[in-house]
Image: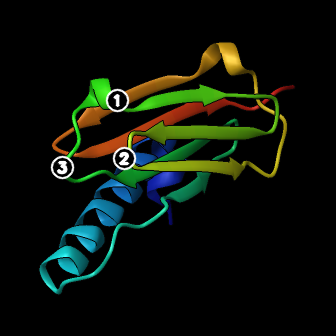
Amino acid sequence: MSTASDEDPLEDVLGEIARVARREADRAAAGGEDDPGELIEGGDEVTFVMVTRGRERMDIDVKAEDDRLRVESYDFKIVRPLGCAVDPSTAKTTYVNGVLSVRIAKRV
């Protein structure tokens, strides 16, 4: 029996991002506070997902370092250990409908 990860690892990561976004939307509807984000470790990359309601992409500064990620805005600062060495030059950031996603390749 094959799993989604056997067929397409990117599909697994995108599915996890969608689950995080749904969970955060449910929590916001219930009056929950901002979440400091969630780390998703894949085979050859690490993805950080965070809901940033009420902010624009230009308000958020993201910097990948060797083994951590810094995410800052006018009202918060997060320094998140990644649990592995990464290649900061590969960091790809997307921001859609208030959901920040940062994908970084693991260092080989």
Residue type at tag 1: Thr
Q: Earlier in the sequence, mark 2 or mark 3?
A: 2
Q: Secondary structure at mark 3?
A: loop
Q: Nearer the viewer, residue 9 or 47?
A: 47
Q: Is residue 37 left or right of residue 95?
A: right
Q: Residue at x 29, y 33 (%)?
A: 95
Q: Nearer the viewer, residue 8 or 10?
A: 10
Q: Is residue 21 left or right of residue 104?
A: left
Q: Which mark is residue 54?
A: 3
Q: Residue at x 73, y 48 (%)?
A: 82
Q: Earlier in the sequence, mark 1 or mark 2?
A: 2
Q: Which residue is mark 1?
A: 94
Whole-percent x and y of residue 61? 46, 28
Marks 1 and 2, Cα distance to the nearest angstrom?
A: 12 Å
Marks 2, 3: nearer the viewer: 3
Quadrant of residue 57 in the image?
top left
Q: Nearer the viewer, residue 31 or 75?
A: 75
Within 10 Å of the Cα at label 1, are there few (<14), some (14-19), or many (20+) other Cα atoms?
A: few
Q: Earlier in the sequence, mark 1 or mark 3?
A: 3
Q: Is residue 33 above or below residue 55?
A: below
Marks 1, 3: nearer the viewer: 3
Q: Is residue 49 above or below residue 69?
A: below
Q: Secondary structure at mark 2?
A: helix
Marks 1, 2: nearer the viewer: 1
Tell me the quarter of the image containing the C terminus.
top right
